[in-house]
């Protein structure tokens, strides 16, 4: 069997004896690996490496090297999580993040090689032990990195849901809902609710849904629009749909979707004119055209 | 007749609502690259949206194969949607306007056929469904 207790002790001794040299080599290795100059400050990097080395030595001394889920390794894993998630947030690439752990291999193996020049068996044991640990630590940093990125994506998705549904008041009794982007089930729900809510709040009787910013109008989108129109009608508001571009109009015809008795217009401006008319209002020029 | 050349091919998974958006965007990019006009691109993307969603909702997820084609001087885009769902027992009925086994409008399949130049559907109950559409410049 390779590895085991002998390998662990050899690894511990080698790290302990060469701490300074390992640190220098490791930092140099990483500086070279970064694609962007100045992506990380050398002092900061050095500090991270120092902390890792300290925790790493402690964990090897006290802990079980075959199972990193034991309490002795907790400090190392937590530290790596911090490094990894901060790099994830700063926009480091996955390989730049994983480099932190993996670039430690070369300096460490060099040190092990020096310590066991004459003993092939001991060297193999120590190297195997080191590889097994570092690989698992490297995978751990990737797990954390991915989780961090996923959190960022989830946050952005939520931001977009909120951002994308502003119901604006155009005139007394007239609301407009400019929809931008994809109208799938989750968003449509938010869109529909905020429109109906604003109809109640403002007592509006005309609502314009503008779909200029919706790239694809398929049967699901059409169905959602028709449901919203029906719900608004039940609350006493008339809905107009604007922003039907020529290609969308042709597509709707081929799909066979009937928009029934919903008033539709090509532009928001013409829908607004209809809504004003229905409210008994009109826009007049107050000065002659220049 | 000149033989048809497949210029590029890509397979995308359809497992969630977000994948439908991805397939749509990819189809739009490939169709635009093939030189299809705005109306044709919109029609193809809309048909794609219907079929990808069908594969997700009725087929329990599947894959979309997007191919950019060249047939002599004609350029086009072909999409193949496959799922391993329950299959369609009566295709003729499923292709009828307004018929749905779910909660949609019942226009997806027939609409997708009208929006495409080529259309074929193959379904085996208990094994799954494969729908192929193509749109040419």
Image (cartoon, coloured by chain):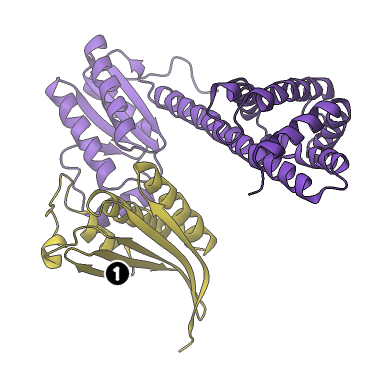
Chain colours: A purple, B yellow
Residue bearing mark 1: B119
In the picture provided, is B128 more to the left or to the right than A93? left
Which is nearer the eye, A52 or A35? A52
**What residue is at 31 percent from the left and 26 percent from the top?**
A191
Q: Position of residue B109 (x, y in %)?
A: 23, 59
Q: Position of residue A1 (x, y in %)?
A: 63, 49
In the current view of this chain or complex, which residue is farthest to the bottom? B1
Picture quarter with the C terminus of chain A: top right
Can residue B21 be seen here? The reply is yes
**What residue is at 83 percent from the left and 20 percent from the top?**
A43
Q: Position of residue A6 (x, y in %)?
A: 71, 38
**What residue is at 52 percent from the left and 78 percent from the top?**
B73
Which is nearer the eye, B82 or A46? A46
In the picture provided, is B91 more to the left or to the right than A18? left
In the picture provided, is B133 more to the left or to the right than A59? left
Q: Quadrant of residue A22?
A: top right
Task: Chain letter for mark 1, please.
Answer: B
Q: Secondary structure at mark 1?
A: strand
């Amino acid at each position: 069997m390779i590895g085991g207790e002998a390998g662990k002790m050899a690894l511990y001794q080698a790290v302990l004896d060469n701490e300074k040299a390992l640190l220098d080599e490791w930092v140099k290795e990483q500086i070279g690996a970064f694609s962007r100059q100045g992506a990380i400050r050398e002092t900061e990097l050095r500090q991270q490496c120092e902390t890792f080395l300290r925790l790493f030595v402690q964990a090897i001394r006290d802990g079980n090297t075959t199972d990193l889920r034991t309490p002795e390794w907790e400090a190392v894993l937590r530290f790596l999580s911090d490094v990894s998630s901060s790099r994830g947030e700063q926009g480091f690439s996955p390989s730049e993040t994983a480099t932190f752990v993996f670039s430690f291999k070369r300096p460490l193996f060099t040190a092990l090689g020096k310590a066991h020049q004459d003993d092939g068996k001991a060297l193999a044991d120590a190297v195997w032990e080191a590889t097994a640990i570092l690989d698992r630590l490297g995978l751990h940093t990737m797990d954390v990195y991915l989780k961090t990125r996923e959190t960022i994506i989830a946050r952005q998705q939520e931001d977009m849901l909120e951002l994308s549904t502003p119901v604006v008041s155009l005139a007394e009794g007239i609301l407009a809902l400019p929809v931008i982007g994809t109208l799938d089930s989750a968003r449509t729900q938010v869109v529909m609710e905020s429109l109906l809510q604003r109809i109640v709040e403002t007592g509006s009787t005309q609502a314009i849904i503008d779909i200029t910013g919706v790239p694809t109008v398929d049967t699901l989108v059409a169905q959602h629009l028709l449901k919203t129109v029906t719900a608004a009608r039940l609350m006493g508001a008339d809905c107009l749909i604007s922003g039907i571009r020529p290609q969308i109009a042709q597509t709707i015809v081929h799909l066979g979707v009937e928009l029934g008795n919903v008033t539709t217009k090509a532009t928001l401006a013409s829908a607004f004119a209809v809504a004003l008319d229905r409210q008994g209002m009109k826009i007049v020029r107050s000065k002659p055209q220049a | 007749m000149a033989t048809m050349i497949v210029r590029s091919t890509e397979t995308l998974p359809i497992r969630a609502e977000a994948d439908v958006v991805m397939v749509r965007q990819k189809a739009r990019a490939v169709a635009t690259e093939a030189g299809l006009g705005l109306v044709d691109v919109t029609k193809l993307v809309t048909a794609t949206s219907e079929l990808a969603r069908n594969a997700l909702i009725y087929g329990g997820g599947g894959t979309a194969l997007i191919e950019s084609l060249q047939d002599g001087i004609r350029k086009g885009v072909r999409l193949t949607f496959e799922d391993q769902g329950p299959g369609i027992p009566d295709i003729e009925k499923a292709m009828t306007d307004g018929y749905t086994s779910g909660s949609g409008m019942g226009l997806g399949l027939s609409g997708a056929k009208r929006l495409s130049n080529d259309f074929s559907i193959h379904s085996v109950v208990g094994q799954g469904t494969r729908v192929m559409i193509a749109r040419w410049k």
